[in-house]
Image (tube, rainbow, N blue to C red):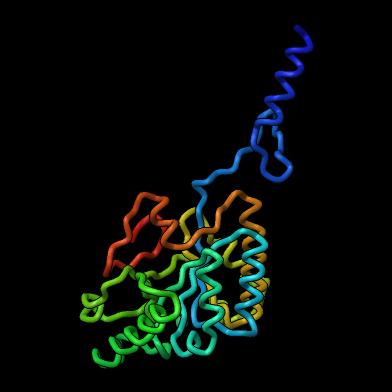
C-alpha cells in the first residue's frame, strides 16, 4: 500500500508540467500564465546589418514579433521578409518611403501604401498586410479608404532618439503590461540589443511574445479593416 502511494506521488510529480525549473513556491507549483500576452513591433526596416541578428535572437527565445516594413527597404532585403513569415512573425506595411501620410496628397499617400502592399503580396503571396502609418498619423479622409486593420502602439521608449540600450530597456519595462504594443525600430543595433533583453526580462515574468494579430485574436477580438488598434485589448 505504501509503495503504491509513493508510486502515485512520483507519477504526479512527473505529470505536473514544469516551466524552467518548475518552481515550487510554498508548496504550490508556479504555472505559466498564458493571459500575459505582449507584442513587440519593429518599424522602418528591414536592414541586413541588424534585422538578421534580431531574428536569430527572437528564434532562440521562441518569441514572435510584428514588423512594419518600409517598401524601399523590403525591396532590398527580400530574404529577410520571407524569413520573418517562415519564422512565425507578422509582416505589415509602413509605406514605401516612410512618407508622412497626413501631409502627402491623397494620391501620393495611397500610392505609397499600395506599392508596399503589392511588394509584400509578390514576396509572400496573397494576404492582409496591416498598416502602421509613419509617426502613427493618418488623416481622417485617408483612414476611411484603408481596407486593412491599422496598428499604433501603447509603449514608446523613443529608441530612435536615445539609441541607448539600457534606457530603452528601462523605459519599456517601466510601462509594459499585459496586451501592450511596444514600438521599436530594428534599424538600430541598440534597439536590437534592447529588444532581446526585454524578451528575457518579461519572459521571466511569464509574458508570451506574440504578433499583434495573435494578441487580438487570443483576446477574442476579430481585427477589422480601417480600425486603428493601440493595444491587444482593442482599439
Ligand atoms: Ni517609422
Where is residue 155? Give x, y as percent: 49, 66
Q: Locate residue 57 relative to residue 224 in the image: left or right.
A: right
In the depicted structure, whether residue 88 falls above or below residue 54: above
The quarter of the rendered structure image containing the N terminus is: top right
Residue 86 visible from this viewpoint: yes
Which percent across, then down, holds residue 208? 55, 53
Closer to us: 43 or 170 = 43
Q: Looking at the picture, how far across and down is residue 231, in whole percent?
A: 41, 61
Dividing the picture into quarters, in which one does residue 21 lie? top right
Query: Which residue is outermost to the right?
Result: 3
Asked if residue 186 is positioned above or below residue 105 in the image, the reply reads: above
Taking the spot 39% from the left edge, 56% from the top edge, the residue there is 216
For image coordinates 54% across by 85% down, the residue present is: 77
Residue 126 location, x and y as percent? 36, 73
Residue at image point 61% right, 56% down: 202
Q: Quadrant of the C terminus?
A: bottom left
The quadrant holding residue 203 is bottom right
- Say whether residue 135 is visible: no
Amino acid at each position: 500500500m505504501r509503495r503504491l502511494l509513493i508510486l502515485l506521488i512520483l507519477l504526479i510529480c512527473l505529470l505536473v508540467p514544469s516551466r524552467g525549473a518548475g518552481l515550487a513556491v510554498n508548496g504550490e507549483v508556479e504555472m505559466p500564465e498564458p493571459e500575459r500576452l505582449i507584442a513587440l513591433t519593429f518599424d522602418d526596416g528591414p536592414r541586413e546589418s541588424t534585422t538578421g541578428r534580431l531574428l536569430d535572437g527572437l528564434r532562440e527565445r521562441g518569441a514572435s514579433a510584428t514588423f512594419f516594413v518600409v517598401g524601399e527597404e523590403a525591396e532590398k532585403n527580400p530574404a529577410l521578409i520571407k524569413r520573418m513569415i517562415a519564422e512565425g512573425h507578422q509582416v505589415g506595411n509602413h509605406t514605401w518611403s516612410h512618407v508622412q501620410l497626413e501631409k502627402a496628397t491623397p494620391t501620393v499617400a495611397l500610392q505609397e501604401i499600395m506599392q508596399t502592399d503589392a511588394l509584400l503580396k509578390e514576396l509572400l503571396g496573397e494576404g492582409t498586410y496591416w498598416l502602421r502609418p509613419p509617426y502613427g498619423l493618418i488623416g481622417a479622409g485617408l483612414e476611411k479608404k484603408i481596407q486593412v486593420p491599422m496598428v499604433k502602439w501603447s509603449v514608446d521608449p523613443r529608441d530612435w532618439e536615445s539609441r541607448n540600450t539600457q534606457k530603452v530597456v528601462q523605459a519599456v519595462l517601466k510601462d509594459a503590461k499585459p496586451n501592450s504594443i511596444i514600438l521599436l525600430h530594428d534599424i538600430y543595433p541598440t534597439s536590437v540589443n534592447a529588444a532581446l533583453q526585454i524578451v528575457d526580462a518579461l519572459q521571466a515574468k511569464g509574458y508570451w511574445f506574440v504578433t499583434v494579430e495573435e494578441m487580438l485574436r487570443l483576446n477574442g477580438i476579430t481585427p477589422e479593416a480601417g480600425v486603428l488598434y493601440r493595444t491587444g485589448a482593442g482599439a
